[in-house]
Amino acid sequence: MITLIKRPTPSKGWSYATPIVAVLATMVAGGMLFAALGKNPVEAIRVIFWDPLFGANAAYFRSQLLVKAAPLILIASGLAVGFRAGIWNIGAEGQYIIGAICGAAVALSVYPAESAWLFPAMVIAGALGGWLWGMIPALLKTLFGTSEILVSLMLVYVAQNLLAYVAFGPLKNPQGYGFPGSRNLQQYPSAHNPELFAGTGAHWGVMAAIVAVIALYILMHRHIAGFRIRVAGEAPRAARFAGVVPARLVVFCLGLSGALAGLAGLFEVSGPSGQITDSFNAGYGFTAIIVAFLGRLHPLGILLAGLLMGLTYFGGDMAQLMLQLPAAAIQVFQGMLLFFLLGFDVLTNYRIRIGGARA
Amino acid sequence: MTGNMLLEITGLTKAYPGVVANDGVGFSVGPGEVHALLGENGAGKSTLVKMIYGLVKPDSGTMHLMGAPYTPPEPRAARASGVAMVFQHFSLFEALNVAENVALGMENPPPMGQLSARIREISAAYGLPLDPARLVGDLSAGERQRVEIIRCLLQDPKLLIMDEPTSVLTPQEVDILFHTLRKLSSEGTAILYISHKLEEIRSLCDRATILRGGKVVATCTPREKSARELAEMMVGGEFTTTDRAGRVLGTTIFEVAGLDLTPMSQFGPALKQVSLSLRAGEVLGIGGVAGNGQEELLATLSGERVSAPGTVRLHGQDISGLGPNDRRRLGLQGAPEERLGHAAVPNMSLTDNTLLTGTVRRPLTRKGFLDMTAAKLFAEEIIREFDVRTPGPHVAARALSGGNLQKYVIGREVLQYPEVLIVNQPTWGVDAAAAASIRQALLDLAGKGAAVIVISQDLDELMEIADQFCALNEGRLSPPRPTEGLSIDEIGLMLGGAHGMQEAGMQEVAV
């Protein structure tokens, strides 16, 4: 018989070890999955994790790593604040889309005027768009007690439909020969979010992600506001005793994570992606949830987890290309990571005892 | 002797890593005997009864029940042998109703309707009013304990173990319970009774076994000893009583007038026209059975819930609309009843837990940024000044025993030198020595000129430290009475909700 025994104090060691154990377990289970699909599991794992960093063409992939990881880290930083407080924003994907639409709309509305103020204005519009999309579940929760999990998630599908509408309608490129999608912002100097240092992939979104990680650390671990947010997640009654107003916390957390997701969307549409299309979103908003948890909701952890998940993104692309693995297999692989993480998390608060009678 | 004893225990030993909880414990209980287990928290009473109830397996030693070897591998076996237990901490499902909870504890529960009728019957017979159809989640602590007691009585036990059963009852209810217990005892049911209340034990129990540090230090007939002698046997030294002398009452600093509050939960009590006033240096005791608005009162006075303008005033300033931290800034602190999850965050360290209430009056932050060194020093100060037994401030709050955590919580508030301190059940489940030190700390604070409100179900405690006494009953607060010269019977009437009688009495005075 297996017995779980609660630890008197949460184990520090396990709280750091579980992400690593989870990654290893995912590799083993993922390898089994790939083997069941008739692929060589060792090769598949190598193609996903090793080749992009150290194989042929590694230089190109390494620059892509920051491009993929930045939105994940930026979004996860915002989500981590809410997750700490027990406020579950599952709709970052939607906030990401709306941020991108709003930012792009600002640029396209003044096209082709050039101004140094245009990009800052787009950044504000992107953040504001994401914030507004986050405010919908926040207000419904505070006013009517609805579940922010369901509302924010369902708003993702609303956002996707809005995206399709603007891509075929208002924001469609008038000179696009009828193809869906907006003008390419990469060809609009004032609106373009360029690679800042050649060959690194670092654009403004990467800078924003770094700032977000540092700001997250200061807020959550150095400031009384972050302390109260953590208390709210651990013990809601104690948080009220400490002076937290629950409604204000809901608005703050959903607003912040919405704004950061919106920013990520804006940096993506004005940079690596370049244009609004109906398939513009790549699931960063959902993957960021895994990043946040894999990183222990801790800034440094999120940074590392974001890089790792960024790796699986194009490692997965490579695996599709070279080994003909189905795209769904890669998504299962990513999902397994969260599954194992949450599973092994039990060990932080519990010890396992196998066999033996009750003492 | 074995032949006529119901339960006989010899050489029972149980060691946990680092501590021997029970060391060669032996005692016996005869049929129909009311036997007290006395001892401070950590003396080993809980471990001992858990072994008798089959929750914990002894390392060595033997138990005999009715002459036969008794080694219950689990509580179910203990119940089958006729041993029942009422725990101090309730094991109830909040989302289920009373009857369903009772059914879950039975081997072969009868149909619901029949069971509900039985519950009504027993609750009427033993004076423990309880509606079988109500959700446990909406019940007060006192009512929840009634569920536990009735659950045991339904099993018709040979030996009933009761862990501090009276802490949530009014004096009249205690009388009824004692009547019940004596009746059970005369019918041949033995009762193993754990309590800190020495007077109770003296009036109820036939014999007492006193534990200290896991060993039996004495067996006596409690009626032949004074409460003081019993206490000294328990702590193994001279027992210090609190010193309430030398306080000077100042001007009125805290006033509550016409405070109304809607219930926090569906069946929770509302506060109705609560009024009180406190002078500097004064201790006001608020007695009452749990679930009559104590939590609501503390939440409203500490600022967790705001109330109508003008209802709460500190130094004449209206603070009705201010949150907890604004009130702390003005000198009002509170300590809620629930230590884990309300007064302290279970998974956070004692250092982190100082930040919960301590950032306003203590320099634990600089412009909002945490000063963890200062927080650690403050936690160490609390541990030192209030004798909190813990390896250090890095330990999680949940790892502390109830008494030690309570000392920490009270210490955290007292050491911020509030002008008004409101505490709810400050010594619930705390051992005698720790309770005495907490009471002394409250008196010392009042001695320095603070006004202190003590909300408690322990009437002896209120009589010991309070200057004025009010009863809180169904959300109404009685007018204050000086504690000097107040008899337990009068208090009982105040708590019993005899508002009509009081009014009648006052009219008589007026006439």
Image (spheres, grey):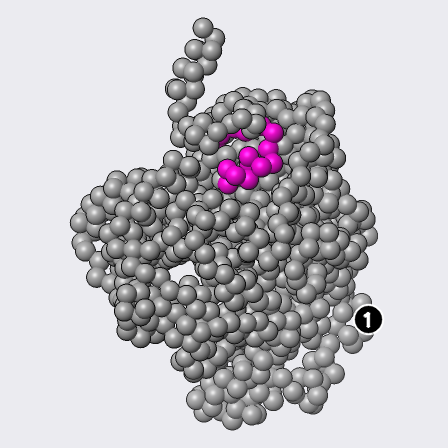
The residue under label 1 is A197
* Residue A142 percent location from the top left of the image: 53, 42
* Residue B56 percent location from the top left of the image: 42, 70
Badge 1 crowding class, 10 Å Cα cut-off, few under 14, some 14 to 19, many 20 or more, is few
Residue at left offset 71%, top offset 22%: B251
Q: Quadrant of the N terminus of chain A?
A: bottom left
**Image quadrant where residue B424 sits:** top right
Q: Amino acid at mark 1?
A: Phe
Magenta stretch encompasses residue B100: no
Magenta stretch encompasses residue B474: yes
Name the one closer to the observer, A3 or A165: A3
Q: Is residue B92 left or right of residue B429?
A: left
Q: Is residue B430 left or right of residue B331?
A: left
Element under label 1? loop
Is B324 situated above or below B412? above
In magenta, the rendered stretch is B458-475
